[in-house]
Image (spheres, rainbow, N blue to C red):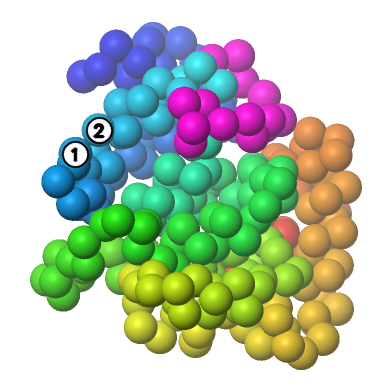
Amino acid sequence: MSKSTKLCGKTSCPRSNIFCNLLDKIVKRPSLQFLGQWGYHCYEPRIYRSLAKILRTFTPVYCPSPLSGITPLFYVAQTRQSNIFKILLQYGILEREKNPINIVLTIVLYPSRVRVMVDRELADIHEDAKTCLVLCSRVLSVISVKEIKTQLSLGRHPIISNWFDYIPSTRYKDPCELLHLCRLTIRNQLLTNNMLPDGIFSLLIPARLQNYLNLEI
């Protein structure tokens, strides 16, 4: 058991403590190997040290200044750990990103200079990539499909061939749903007051709407 895990066990871990939640949900992801270089696994200890540093004195406020050139959300998107990605989104971290499209591109595309893996290596990654894309569509009002296609035209490769099916047309072509815009407005107000996600469950609304605000559906 790691030192951080032992410390978490000795101290009281409130339900709202995102770091304790993350410790419980860390999963190993097959590395995307750079050609002739180390794989992304070399970043894994760094990212959780970074998360620990950010969340040591817990606050849902997140300031996305790059840590060693990579933010926690970017790394989790890069490794497509969808369960941790969901937690970070529930806390409003994607809304705080300066360029959310970069997170979407990270999910959809192989990083540049990375070899394309064979199908058997992608078995676990495909489903998580799809889940991450769906989660992004629950947070963003606009996803630039044009930007993704531009990257593809430059020779980048998609992790999943049918990525287009997991981005609703209301995020790039059709008018955005009023229900979704209401979700964004309420979440933004809660985020401004540092009340995501716990503040959702203090709202006097049906449980289904609470789940909708919390990106469950």
Residue 95 rendering spot, x and y as whole percentages: 71, 50
Nearest the eye: 204 or 123: 123
The image quadrant of residue 39 is: top left
Res. 84 in view = no
- State the CA–CA distance, disc 1 to disc 2: 7 Å
Q: Which mark is on residue 30?
A: none
Residue 196 rendering spot, x and y as whole percentages: 72, 42
Crowd class of label 2 (few under 14; some 14 to 19; many from 20; radius 10 Å) = few
Determine whether 128 is above or below 177 in the image: above
Query: Which corner quadrant holds the N terminus?
Result: top left
- Relative side of 195 to 68, left or right: right
Residue type pointed to by label 1: Trp
Disc 1 and disc 2 in contact, CB within 8 angstroms: yes
Q: Residue at x 37, y 11 (%)?
A: 7
**Which residue bears the numbered disc 2?**
42
* Magenta residues (range): 56-70
